[in-house]
Image (tube, helix red, strand yellow):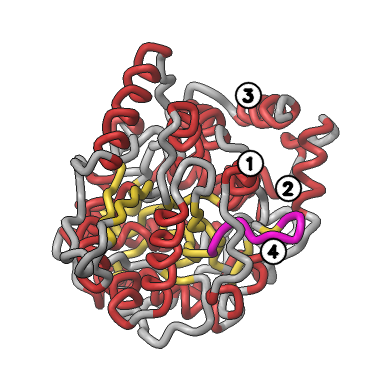
Amino acid sequence: MKKVKIISLVLLIIFAVSLLSACDSTKTGTPSQSSGGGDAPAGGKTTKITFVSGKPEIQALLEDTFKLFSQENPGIEMELVAGQANQSPYQMLTVMYNAGNAASCFMMEQGDVLKLKDNLADLSGEKFKNDAVEAALKAVTADGKLYAAPFICESVGFVYNKKVIENAIGGPFDPNSIKTINDLEDIFKKVEASGVTAVGVSPENWSLGAHYMMYLYANQYPNSEKNTEFVNSLKSGTADLVNNKVYNGWLDTFDLLKKYNINKDDPLAANNDKNAALITEGKIAFWFMGNFIWPVMQNLNANIEDFGLMPVPVSNNESDVNNRQLLSLFSMYLCVDKAQNTPEQQEASKKFIEWILYSESGQNEMINKLSLVPAYKHFTIETKEPLSASLIKYIKANQTLDFNILYPSDHWQVLGGSMQKYLADQADRKTLAEEIETYWKNVK
């Protein structure tokens, strides 16, 4: 839903040792970050389970969610194993498995689930299977087994400050009025003329190499399985990005972001937290980000009525409906380890999944506390926060651009670095195209 440093062998060893220590403490009854939980049933024992989150922005909030779960499920205690900002869940879990201390339950990005299937419990018999969006189930099913529970539907696009924009244009703002790249620049100019900087660009490699690049892939053959054919052409070396229409339109939009970026003088010095503060305070009008950022903005006292999420146009063709479609994807799944956790821990992990998806308090935590959009049809609680509400609005209007490419786990790190060079004017279009093509040709 992450992050350009190369971890040295020494750091990796230190991390593995720390995980070994942390997880061993769970098994001996002294977890490092335990939910506390309720009292165990009379005559019973406490089952302790560990959890790895794939979303750093909600890790602190998850602690409270785990406490509530343990209160409502006496005898189960949950511990959050904190990840590192520059690691994907798959990379972290690989270290944990090698150390013999895999988490009991964990978030996993869609493209990585089946890589660990030999270690994962089959969830085919669980209740959620009948209520999940079918496309989300298909991606994690193999050999007649279901290896994960769909969890989150997310979107990336332009977070916008409605109040700032409407002040600049002198009237109501309709995101659907932005039909082309030129329309986007026109409104950028009006915002700048009002005395506010138009846009902020987050330089983190996960934002550029995972999220912004989604619009490159998804727009090749919109809402079609043919997008995998495009990726296959990259792998085979037959793709020609320099002459690819979508590639050039996608970079035309990015060039616009570079031109009006509040941090254009030192673009790599910015970060997510700074940009969140800037848009919340009305110092920028647009920011390429996702609905998952709302908890950060909420902590900055963002006004619910002032914000929304809108698509990224990648052409100057007014009839191109994809310019008005918000990119969406099933980003995170919940998995249960069967290889290094006891049957009791596996059942406790399944109970947590059922609790957060079906209980009233679990659904409330997911929707209103964690600000997540569920990949399910049965939820009765509606979101109050504006970014996820925007995503749901586009879904209901059938205006979503579905992302169906399975990223290799190092995609955002490697190509995020390439995008950072382009952002900092250290690479041109030809160089970026070559680096993207080289990356895919070397994917095994």
Q: How many angstroms separate mark 3 from mark 1 (CA)? A: 31 Å
Label 1 crowding class (10 Å Cα cut-off): few <14, some 14-19, many 20+? few
Residue 216 is one of the magenta-drawn residues: no
Q: In the shown orientation, is residue 33 left or right of residue 90?
A: left
Q: Residue 431 — which label?
A: 3
CB contact under 8 Å: marks 3 and 2: no
Amino acid, disc 4: Lys
Q: How many angstroms separate mark 3 from mark 2 (CA)? A: 17 Å
Residue 33 occupies quadrant: top left
Label 4 crowding class (10 Å Cα cut-off): few <14, some 14-19, many 20+? few
Please identify, in this view, whether the residue under mark 3 or under mark 4 is nearer the observer.
Answer: 4
Q: How many angstroms separate mark 1 from mark 4 (CA)? A: 15 Å
Q: How many angstroms separate mark 4 from mark 2 (CA)? A: 31 Å
Q: According to the image, label 2 marks what residue? A: 245
Which contiguous range is marked in magenta? 142-149
Give the residue at x 41% y 79%.
358
Identify the mark nearer the N-term, 4 or 2: 4
Q: Horizontal and vertical percent for residue 216?
A: 63, 48
Q: According to the image, label 4 marks what residue? A: 138
Label 3 crowding class (10 Å Cα cut-off): few <14, some 14-19, many 20+? some
CB contact under 8 Å: marks 1 and 4: no
Helix, strand or loop under label 4: helix
Amino acid, disc 3: Thr
Give the residue at x 61% y 56%.
147
Please identify, in this view, whether the residue under mark 3 or under mark 1 is nearer the observer.
Answer: 1
Q: Horizontal and vertical percent for residue 397?
A: 56, 83
Amino acid, disc 2: Lys
- Extreme bottom residue here? 380
Amino acid, disc 1: Lys
Q: Horizontal and vertical percent for residue 73?
A: 27, 70
Identify the mark nearer the N-term, 3 or 1: 1
Q: According to the image, label 1 marks what residue? A: 115
